[in-house]
Amino acid sequence: MRQPVDPPPHTSSDASASSSAAEPAAETVAAGSFDSGRGNIDASVDERVPVYRQPGFVPFLVARLAAVFAMQIQAIVVAWQVYDLTRDPLTLGYVGLAQFLPMVVLLLPAGDVVDRFNRKRILQLSWFAQGLCSAALIALSLASPQSALPFYAVLVLFGAARAFTGPTLQSLLPQIVPRARLGEAIALNSSIMKIGVIGGPLLGGVLYALGPATTYGVVLACFLLAQLTLFGVPVRYAFERRQTDDTAWQRFTAGIHYIRTRPVILGVISLDLFAVLFGGIVALLPVYAHEILHVGPEGLGALRSAVAIGALLMGLYLGVRAIKRHAGIVMFAAVAVFGLANLVFALSHVFWLSFGALLVAGAADMISVYVRLTLLQLATPDEMRGRVNAVNMLFIGASNELGEFESGVTAAWFGTVPAAVIGAVGTLGVVGLWMWAFPVLRRADRLDDIEEQAVR
């Protein structure tokens, strides 16, 4: 491991700098040495406090959960509304594309912004922009347009705002809880968000019966709740920003260069990228439900929920029983179990066995996510977290999209079951190759001992 970054000298916040997100963050202080609004704190005492009692952590979870519900409800409603307007399945692809493309274009600049300015203010502004998009969708629904183009325009703006939300959320959490509690915070945060992922689409479907304008009104209310709750979240563990003479392009690409030269970070991000690329079995669930398991739409819904339920339960467990030793081996084992569970699903013709396999796959994936995100956050200094998390999110988005594409192509070439088997075996192959290629990741032991990889 490289030597940890030396903490900057103790500084106090400049009150005048916190007036807007366009100014450097006022809440950036030496980690663990000062709590804005509470005076001096003892980091060692804070680290003994359970994560759910850390000041600001529960309000942060509530704010994020409200935003997740808003995005999940809106996703199901806008897709249904556009399809109802056009009756063209291709328009559903355009709905996703309108949100995905601006995110891809803006993620790297967004990571630079996150590292240079107040992260809490950036998150508030991005949620505010998404709330404005929901208000625009209300107006469009009341106007009853005859074309889907206005909806695409709003979704482009929504995707642009989301480009800032992702890296900000990932980079803000380490500024809210102490380093020693970060793993538990990540596990609870990831599992609680599954509630929104599971419940949001269900609630959106129920609310749509009241009309799209009413449903978008609920979305807007959720974004408002997220904003109000976030106001009460103190930022206590941020580092002082360092001014550099780098050009904008150098700052944008610094995250890629940083990851490429750090084996631990490169290993965890690329492992997830290729494991998800080969393990994108979710895209084949409709075919399995209809042609192989013969369970209909209700069974398809159950299969889709199995992965999220497994991840939710495992995340709650990890939130109280953190992984203490052999983190690298545990992560590789979890990805291998994920591949084996997908292989069982691929070969199964029994619904409950398939459901159980997806449940195990979701739980194993949560273990991998827990170790990966914790390693990523602990090994990355605060001054680089925005850009590194932006690259990570770019990889995640690419792997999800390409994984579904790969599953569809191989299913068209070889058939559904062979495609699923190929993907599962490919995941297992990735595990073996990465264990050989990244020995430093394989040897990672205690997450608490992971040292920040210095910026050179």
Image: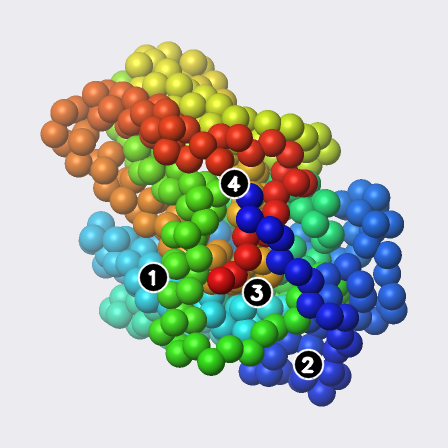
Secondary element type, mark 4:
helix
Mark 1 Cα-neighbour bin, 10 Å: few <14, some 14–19, many ≥20: some
Q: Residue at x 44, y 15 (%)?
A: 352
Distance (Cα) linking label 3 and label 1: 22 Å
Q: Amino acid at mark 1?
A: Val
> Which residue position holds label 2?
18
Please tell me whether mark 2 or mark 3 is closer to you in this view. Answer: 3
Q: Residue at x 28, y 53 (%)?
A: 92
Give percent across and percent down for residue 176: 70, 58
Distance (Cα) linking label 2 and label 3: 18 Å
Colouring mode (rainbow / by chain / secondary structure / one colour): rainbow
Mark 3 Cα-neighbour bin, 10 Å: few <14, some 14–19, many ≥20: some
Q: Amino acid at mark 4?
A: Arg
Would you say 125 lies left or right of 36 here?
A: left
Mark 2 Cα-neighbour bin, 10 Å: few <14, some 14–19, many ≥20: some
> Which residue position holds label 3?
383
Would you say 129 lies left or right of 7 here?
A: left
Q: Of the residues under marks 2 and 3, which one precedes in the sequence?
A: 2
Mark 4 Cα-neighbour bin, 10 Å: few <14, some 14–19, many ≥20: many
Examine the rendered structure and indicate whether residue 62 appears above or below residue 107.
above
Q: Of the residues under marks 1 and 4, which one precedes in the sequence?
A: 1
Judge by depth and name the residue closer to the eye, 429 or 320.
Answer: 429
Secondary element type, mark 2:
helix
Examine the rendered structure and indicate whether residue 260 appears above or below residue 311.
below
Label ID, residue 104 = 1
Please tell me whether mark 4 or mark 3 is closer to you in this view. Answer: 3
Q: Quadrant of residue 268?
A: top left
The reply to whether discs 2 and 4 touch (Cβ–Cβ < 8 Å) is: no
